[in-house]
Image (tube, rainbow, N blue to C red):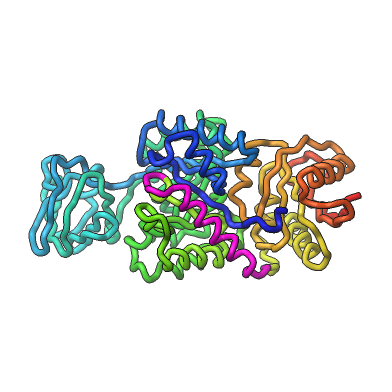
Amino acid sequence: MFHAMRRTKIICTIGPAVDDPRRISALVEAGMDVARLNFSHGTADDHRRYAGMVRDAAEDAGRHVAIMQDLQGPRIRTAELRDEVVLTPGQTITLGGPDSALPLTVPDVVGRMDPGERVLIDGGQIELVVEERVGGQVICRVVRGGPVRSRRGVNLPDSDLDLPALTPKDLEDLRHGVDMGVDMVAISFVRDADDVLRLRDELAEMGSDAWVVAKIERAAALDAVDDILTAAVGIMIARGDLGVEMPPERVPVIQKALIGRAHARSRVVITATQMLESMVEHPTPTRAEVSDVANAILDGTDAIMLSEETAAGSHPVEAVRTMDRIAREIVGTMADDLTFRPSGEVAVKEAISHSACVLATHLDTACIVAFTGSGSTARRISKYRHGVPVHGFTPDPGVARRLSVLWGVHPHVVDRATTADELFDVTERRLLEGEFALSGDLVIIVAGLPVGTPGTTNLVKAHRIP
């Protein structure tokens, strides 16, 4: 029964470690709800192949698995190096264009760097300080050394960068993603809501209704997070870059705050980066990693994400199974949060969604059924983190896939109803066929009248299954 299923969703990054139909099917069977295509790596043909395998595996398993395209954004990296460069504390080295000792993939950023500012390489493992800018490069002093290899990430936490969140590469990749039919698009290095709105405009011009997820990985994004939440369907807490851009001890507090603010606006929230990183090499996680995943779930995140663990790790399927076990164990300890939190949308929609959860608490109900055309109704119900299962009914397969990322929501594709009686008939038939409810059970139905009119969530009904 669905009551025993986990509520927190699992996102898996697809890569060379699972580049095989059988391995993709194993991820789906293990519990993958969303497949992430990381366009920082691989070719368009690679991602098209991954997407096809995910769609086939989901269909074979009878599940709705969403595909999320993750755009690279203006990521600064070390350029291709002939040999690794070993840095020692105290030495000086040049950064910038191809003639520099350490060339960068975005050499123009050196024009925004001033003396005294830090340069962090490879997730902060290596630290440099800018001493002076000379022409098209900067001279830096090594504070914390080590080996530097090609295509290592470079962060400039003190520099006032003015890089667009959507690069020409991103726009080309976006066209490929839309052609593949991706369900969500994650935008990297967001500065403000304008970055999100531009992506939404690009998607609309391409004829896509994919949900936009804003990655929070810069300090500037934290200052604009409320506006970003208004513009996007959800956010991803990219803890790796956040922990480089600011002191890492601040990240857990920021994570909790961001999850709470996303809930208040009925927005999706994904917690990502280094969740089970030791499983890239080892078959079991550390106890600290288990606690990290558990605490993200207790914070109320919609989804937890695996990156290198599934894309390039030695134990991708076991990593998913581990997350699944943790999430199932934790769900029974979570308390309902029925505090009414209007998100600024139409008050009737908010009140109806809240009332459905309150009714489900006070009545002995099998589940809540949310009829939704866009997914918004299911999002509003999901934010209350109710212990009763939520079934999202939609005639749109794309919406059903997107519902897969929502906490506690089980998506269904159903025939389009035209009358209230048809709504009730669809509810009874689907719940009984799937054994999600039994004859005589009480269920809560949330819908809109007139049936089929977008944005008219105005009905909540306690309905007895005959």
Q: Is residue 268 above or below residue 203?
A: below
Q: In this view, does 63 lie above or below 120?
A: above
Answer yes or no: is residue 401 visible: yes
Query: In the image, residue 137 lies at what x, y percent?
Result: 14, 48
Query: In the image, residue 456 lies at what x, y percent?
Result: 77, 47
**Residue at the image point whose x is 28% and y is 47% from the top:** 76
Magenta segment range?
311-337
From the viewer's side, name the closer residue of 108 and 183: 183
Query: In the image, residue 65 lies at what x, y percent?
Result: 58, 41
In the displayed structure, does residue 145 sit left or right of residue 163? left
In the displayed structure, does residue 193 sit left or right of residue 119? right
**Residue at the image point whose x is 80% and y is 52% from the top:** 437
Q: In this view, does 423 lie above or below 9?
A: above
The prevailing secondary structure element of the residues shown in magenta is helix
From the viewer's side, name the closer residue of 192 and 291: 291
Query: In the image, residue 71 lies at what x, y percent?
Result: 42, 42
Give the quadrant of residue 207: top right
From the viewer's side, name the closer residue of 381 and 47: 47
Q: Is residue 149 above or below residue 220?
A: above
Answer yes or no: is residue 168 visible: no
In the displayed structure, does residue 377 sit left or right of residue 174? right
- Magenta-drawn stretch contains 139: no
